[in-house]
Image (cartoon, rainbow, N blue to C red):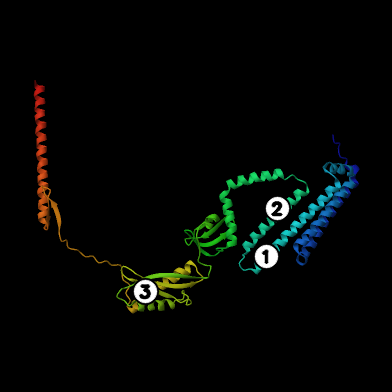
């Protein structure tokens, strides 16, 4: 049973302990103030490591002072010897601290290297640089963990077996999510599109608003936000209409067959070249494409700058309005769909099969109709005779039945 603590008998020890703790707090405050001033000139990570070492030494000194003040050397030594050799444990602890410091420095070096590479190369965005740093940081932490486990002689066989089974279970359960994550890494580095691009992914068309490891989000022109898994994006055709900074658009118009198509083509090109939404270089073109049912088809081709849906439809509307007005002024007719219907005379008419099985031609519809009516009348008379005979038989049978009943 632990006896009661006599505070009066340990007043000096309590006072010195409180004083040492206050001194440790003051040292922490002063160290932070000096470190904040030195971060700009020396470097944040170097200052953090030096600050950590100073505080670690201060904590060790504070612990030793408390053990000495309270005469707990024997108890502490006994507890340490139960774990192992004190000297060996101290060396391992020092190496562990060095490993943590080296890991911190390694992550800093990785970040600076990736940022410098991203600045020198225009093809790497800030988002991709951040992803690359996170991957490098994860690899450094994994190496640090394996080094610490080996230093402290931890048996890794059971951990590796458990990690293997856990990986199988997670792979089966999160197969689609893992596929989306892998596809996200591919998209990050392949860069088929960036945030703000006008893209069409499968049947979805809109502006890319967000790209993450798992999914890609686009805003359609109807104001809807569509979230697409990255594995879906990777398996579909991706059309980027903003990558080159300009886009060609097409408008088809028909010209009457009686019109001068070369003159109509020149009129259309002149009308498109004077429009502000249409680029002058490359110059607009009007190309003859096909013979339609009612007109010769002209394909009006023109380019727009900084492609967007608004610019596209603004140019589309301007081209149709300008070409239509120019055609009206020059007398170029845009025909509407039309069809020609003609009748073809019948030479032999049709044939009617007679009662004897022979066929005879009938050039006059009236004779054939009369023959058909005669046949129909004959058939109707036969049917009427049959019905009358059946009715007579029924009446006769009914009369015999009545006679039997009377008897």
Q: Is residue 274 visible?
A: no
In which quadrant will I find the C terminus? top left
CA–CA distance in space, label 3 to label 1 = 55 Å
Where residue 151 appears, x then y in whole percent? 78, 49
3 vs 1, front mark: 1
- Tell me whether circle 1 and circle 2 mark residues in contact (CB < 8 Å): no
Q: Is residue 33 left or right of residue 318?
A: right
Callout 1 environment at 10 Å: few (<14), some (14 to 19), or many (20+)? some
Q: Secondary structure at mark 2?
A: helix
Q: Residue at x 76, y 49 (%)?
A: 150
CA–CA distance in space, label 3 to label 2 = 69 Å
Q: Residue at x 77, y 54 (%)?
A: 99
Q: Nearer the viewer, residue 382 or 246?
A: 382
Q: Secondary structure at mark 1?
A: helix
The residue that label 1 is drawn on is 115
Where residue 157 appears, x then y in whole percent? 71, 44
Q: Which mark is residue 329?
A: none
Q: Residue at x 61, y 46 (%)?
A: 170
Where 403 sits versus 310, above or below? above
Callout 3 environment at 10 Å: few (<14), some (14 to 19), or many (20+)? some
Q: Is residue 130 visible?
A: yes
Q: Decide which of tag 3 and tag 1 comes sooner along the chain.
A: 1
Where residue 22 appears, x then y in whole percent? 84, 53
1 vs 2, front mark: 2
Where residue 203 appears, x then y in whole percent? 47, 58
Q: Decide which of tag 1 and tag 2 comes sooner along the chain.
A: 1
The residue that label 2 is drawn on is 142
Q: Nearer the viewer, residue 351 or 39?
A: 351
The residue that label 3 is drawn on is 324
Q: Is residue 229 left or right of residue 136?
A: left
């Amino acid at each position: 049973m632990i006896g009661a603590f006599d505070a009066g008998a340990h007043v000096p020890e309590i006072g010195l302990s409180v004083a040492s703790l206050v001194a440790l707090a003051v040292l922490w405050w002063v160290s932070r103030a000096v470190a904040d001033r030195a971060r700009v000139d020396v470097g944040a990570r170097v200052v953090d490591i030096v600050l950590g070492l100073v505080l670690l030494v201060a904590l060790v000194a504070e612990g030793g002072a408390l053990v000495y003040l309270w005469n707990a050397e024997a108890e502490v030594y006994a507890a340490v010897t139960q774990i192992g050799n004190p000297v060996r444990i101290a060396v391992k602890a020092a190496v562990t601290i060095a490993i943590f410091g080296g890991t911190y420095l390694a992550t800093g070096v990785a970040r600076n290297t990736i940022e410098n590479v991203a600045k020198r190369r225009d093809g790497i965005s800030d988002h991709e640089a951040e992803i690359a740093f996170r991957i490098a940081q994860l690899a450094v932490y994994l190496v640090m963990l394996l080094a610490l486990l080996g230093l402290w002689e931890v048996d890794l066989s059971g951990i590796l077996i458990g990690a293997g089974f856990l990986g199988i279970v997670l792979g089966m359960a999160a197969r689609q999510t893992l596929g989306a994550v892998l596809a996200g890494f591919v998209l990050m580095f392949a860069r088929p599109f960036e945030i703000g691009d006008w893209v069409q992914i499968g049947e979805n068309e809109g502006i890319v608003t967000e790209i993450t490891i798992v999914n890609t989000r686009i805003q359609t022109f109807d104001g809807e936000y569509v979230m697409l898994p990255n594995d879906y994006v990777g398996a579909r055709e991706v059309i980027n209409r903003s990558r080159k900074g300009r886009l060609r658009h097409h408008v088809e118009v028909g010209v009457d067959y009686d019109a001068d198509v070369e003159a109509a083509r020149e009129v259309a090109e002149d009308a498109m070249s004077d429009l502000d939404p249409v680029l002058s270089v490359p110059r607009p073109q009007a190309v003859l494409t096909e013979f339609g049912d009612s007109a010769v088809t002209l394909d009006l081709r023109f380019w727009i700058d900084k492609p967007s849906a608004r610019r596209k439809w603004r140019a589309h509307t301007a081209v149709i309005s300008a070409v239509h007005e120019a055609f009206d002024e020059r007398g170029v007719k845009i025909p509407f769909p039309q069809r020609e219907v003609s009748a073809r005379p019948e030479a032999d008419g049709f044939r009617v099969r007679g009662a004897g099985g022979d066929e005879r031609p009938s050039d006059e519809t009236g004779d054939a109709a009369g023959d058909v009516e005669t046949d129909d009348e004959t058939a109707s008379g036969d049917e009427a005779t049959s019905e009358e005979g059946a009715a007579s038989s029924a009446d006769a049978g009914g009369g015999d039945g009545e006679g039997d009943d009377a008897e």
